[in-house]
Image (spheres, helix red, strand yellow):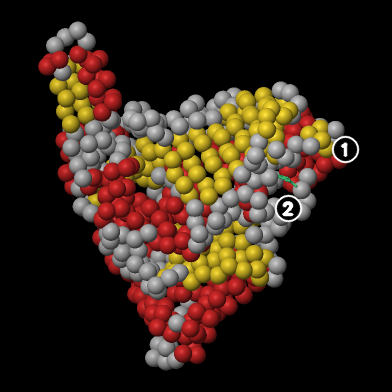
Amino acid sequence: MSEEVKEVSNYSADNIQVLEGLEAVRKRPSMYIGDTGPKGLHHLVYEVVDNSIDEALAGYCDTIKVIIHKGNSITVEDNGRGIPTGINTKEQKSALELVMTILHAGGKFDKDTYKVSGGLHGVGVSCVNALSTHMITVVHREGKIFTQEYERGKPMFDVKAIGVSDRTGTIQTFYPDPEIFTQTLEYKYDTLATRLRELAFLNKGIRLTLTDERYPDDNGNYITEEFYSQGGLKEFVRYLDGTRTPLIPEPIYVEGNKQGIPVELALQYNDTYSENVFSYVNNINTIEGGTHVAGFRMGLTRTLKSYADKSGLLKNVKIDITGDDFREGLTAVISVKVAEPQFEGQTKTKLGNSEVSGAVNVAVGEILSNYLEENPKEARLIVNKVILAATARAAARKAREMVQRKNVMGGNGLPGKLADCANNDPAVCEIFLVEGDSAGGTAKQGRNREYQAILPLRGKILNVEKAMEHKIYENEEIKNMFTALGVSIGTAEDDKELNLSKLRYHKIVIMTDADVDGSHITTLILTFFFRYMKELVEFGYVYIATPPLYLVKKGKEQEYCWNEVQRDAAIQRLKGSGKEDSVHVQRYKGLGEMNAEQLWETTMNPETRTLRRAGIENAAECDHTFSMLMGDEVAPRRDFIEKNAKYAKIDV
Ligand code: 0RA
């Protein structure tokens, strides 16, 4: 939260200027909800849900329903006590009206509630009200139904009773304002579902449902899902690991209050080599980590090290074991609730409160040392895994040094397969990673060689989810990618930091066939970037090309189509009054079926192409997806590909 927001709230505490408060939100919405793009739009929902979560955490609510209506308005309904509707004597207004029309009003009417939820910006429901053309609040409370409605944050009438009720709860419906959300008003089901699923894991026992009324099926039924977790973070860890093979039967789990700080954490080791530690403070994903993560690492290293020493398992081990080695193949989630969190860092998602470190350190130490004492068989599995990690690390360092050395050689060290571009300003340069030599050839002919480079990749690239680190640095295609991109990795023991200062292209475009094999290869390459060059994805350098699926032709007229709807429309258009059989439809099975000119025109020319940018919207969900796509089980992968097939009529 920025300082300025705080000022507004302190100011309004003793001198409430309702309209001015909400006008400020409308004037500078990004200051309150981050941005006015899709992120900010979805943030409105989280803001309202957070209030209901708070009511649930206070112990008064166990069900929260979210509905996406036709036209992209949203309803959030809970079965809590209902926002108080009585008249606040000081302001001579209904408490409900104050909550809905004053920045940060929520907490002031209920000082006893330990407010632990609250989204990243934690600005309250009045902001949602300010940024909606219309908002309707309905409260069931004290045997009655109360309501009030608003237009762009301004009450349309005083709070009024409109009926009797035998339940309690709050129902909020809002219509995001197109004057504010100019980019899009469209809610993404999956985005909301992912956040509600996450909230369910983080707040066990709360039932969250999502219903989408926009696209009923043929029988008029809506898509609806319920998110509920009894096991909390233990189930979250299981979910994240998806189809990875666990090392010990059950995640190690602890929930408790340490030094006055509620700490919940779960951890499991699996048969991969990557570390996946996710952390939350007050239900907010702390992407940049912070004191709670530091405490976790200290506690883990300290406890495992001392157990390993004591148990004699390290007797014949000559190499040093580092902190990293204790976290290879580790999946963990840490969730703490902090009364006054200090968020630092670039994205304000790094916890700064020093007192939290000790609390988590103690919590993980206690649970882990008990576990190791009571489960010697599992303890041995874990320690042996750590020793293996330390051994492999030595090999990996050697392999990394090889890649590094090759990079240092400069210009002539570039891979032979790379058709480089003439320009050497990374900001304008693009590299296409193309599946197969033949498509690579077409792309070389079709490209603009001034600023477009082509790197053909041979067949399936290594599945980095399943390979040990040194194998990855020894893989030919991967080495080629590192050298072509000009990216290197630190070779110091504990420094695997990516060096992007010599990155040679600011657009890295994955270009594969529009079929199942192609999307699998895209996923493999994305997995590699996600695991080994995450920053490239985070900085938005990675793109996916979208080659067309069809060419519809009649005489000299022709249209490219990317899906069946476009194809059928094109057929209709070209058919015109003429005979249908004069229209010819070609289905592109792969990039290789296009000639150089066609590939340029449809897929590579910046004027006409569509690139999809790869992004990490939600790191935890991303991890789950990758583990599932790259894991051993075939069925979930097939389901996912079928569900997400960008290309209809995919041949699975
Ligand atoms: C303050 C006091 C009380 C309830 C709430 C806030 C409340 C707020 C929201 C927002 C969404 N759902 C909510 N449910 C409850 C109740 C005080 C009392 O009844 O004694």
Which residue is label 1 attached to? Answer: 90
Most foreground residue, 339 or 180: 339
Vertical arrangement, residue 29 with respect to residue 345, above or below: above
Q: Which x, y percent locates residue 84?
A: 74, 40
Left or right of residue 304, residue 542 in this image: left
Looking at the image, the residue that sits furthest to the top is 577
Mark 2 beta carbon near ligand 1 (under 8 Å): yes
Q: Name the residue under label 2.
A: 113
- Could you tell me which quadrant the C terminus lies in? top left
| Residue 96 visible within the image | yes
Label whose residue precedes the other's in the sequence (2 or 1)? 1
Amino acid residing under circle 1: Lys
Mark 1 burial class by Cα count in 10 Å: few <14, some 14-19, many 20+: few
Residue at x 62%, y 25% (from the top left corner) = 133
State which quadrant residue 135 falls in.
top right
Q: Which residue occupies the foreground of this view, 45 or 504? A: 45
Using the rendered image of the protein, determine whether residue 411 is visible from the camera's viewpoint. Answer: no
Q: What element carries label 2?
A: loop
Q: Residue at x 87, y 37 (%)?
A: 89
The residue at the point 61 percent across, 44 percent down is: 79
Residue 585 screen position, x and y as percent: 16, 25
Q: What residue type is labelled 2?
A: Thr
Q: Quadrant of ligand 1?
A: top right
Question: Which of 450 and 125 lies nearest the eye of the viewer?
Answer: 125
Say how many tags the image has: 2
In this view, 142 is above or below 263: above
Residue 528 image point, x, y percent:
35, 56
| Residue at the (32%, 50%) spot, across then down | 523
- Left or right, 223 with respect to 116, comes to left
